[in-house]
Amino acid sequence: MLLLEPVPPSPDRHRIRFRGQIAGVGTTSGTRIVVGRWLDSPLGAFADAMVERPDGHRLLLAPHPDVARLVAATYEFDEIRLERFDVRVDPHGWRVRSDSLHLDVGVGGPSALGRLLGLVPRAVAEAPWWCATTDVVARAVLDGVRTRGETRDRREWYGATGNRRLVAASGRFDGADLGGLAPVDPPPRFGFSSTPARPSVTDVVTTIELDRSVVLVGPGTTTGG
C-alpha cells in the first residue's frame, strides 16, 4: 500500500483544520447524537451537535450563524437551529446543554481502537495522507466510518488520535426523554462518514479543503475594520 500525500490544493483553494473531540451517542429512544467540541479552529472555540431523530429527521444545533453556515454547507440536514450551546467536560463525563438538548454522558477508559491510535505519532495521525491510507481499513472494520471523503465542493480528512468508551447517557431532546445509552445504529446520515457504532469520544483533527472565497468568522474570532 502506497502512503502518498494527497494532491495539494489549487491556488484558489486552501485547507483548514478543526482540532477537538467528537462524542457519538446512541440512545434507547432511537435518537442518535454527534456532539462536536472544537478547541481550536478557524472559527474559534465552539461546540455544536448533529441530531438524527428516530424518524430520520436530521438537525444541526449551532451556536452562531457562521458555524451553521460552514457546517450546513459541508453536511446534510433537514433543519438548522441557532441556539446557545455549552459543553462542560471533566475526567468522568460530558455535560451538554442547549435550548433543545440536555445530555449527560459518562466517559470510561480507552477503547481497543483508542489503544491502537495511541501507537501512531500525532503528526502522522493528523496528516491527510495517513487519513487517506487508513480509510481502506476503516471501511472494512468500522461500519459507516470513513476517514476521507468529499461533500459537495469540499474534501475532508478525519485524523483520529484517541478514542474512549462511553459508559452511560441520559437527557432530553425537545423535552422528550432520550432514554439510556445504546449503539449508534443505524449510522446517522449527515455526510459521507459516521461515528463508530459503539458509543465513544474520539480525539480528532478534521481537515477541510475548500474555496478561499468562503468567509470564516465564527463566535470566537473577530474581524478588523
Image (spheres, rainbow, N blue to C red):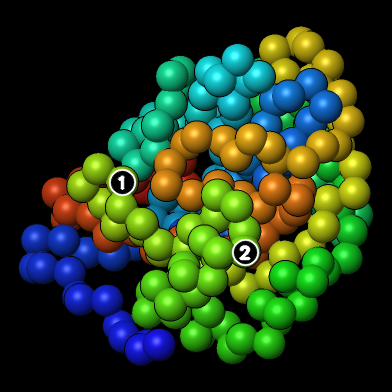
Q: Amino acid at mark 1?
A: Thr
Tell me if residue 110 comes above or below residue 115 in the rendering.
above
Residue at image location 80% in from the left, 46% down from the top: 94
Residue at image location 39% in from the left, 72% down from the top: 132
The percent position of residue 122, horizontal first and vertical second, equals: 57, 83
Taking the image as shown, residue 210 lies to the left or right of residue 32, namely left
Secondary element under disc 1, as helix, strand or loop, is strand
Q: Is residue 170 visible?
A: yes
Foreground residue among 205 and 137: 137
Residue picked out by circle 1: 151
Q: Quadrant of residue 41?
A: bottom left
Work out how far the residue at label 2 is from the one at label 1, CA to CA, in angstroms: 22 Å
The percent position of residue 112, horizontal first and vertical second, equals: 79, 71
Disc 1 residue crowd, few under 14, some 14–19, many 20+, Cα 10 Å: some
Residue picked out by circle 2: 141
Foreground residue among 170 and 38: 170
Q: Amino acid at mark 2?
A: Val
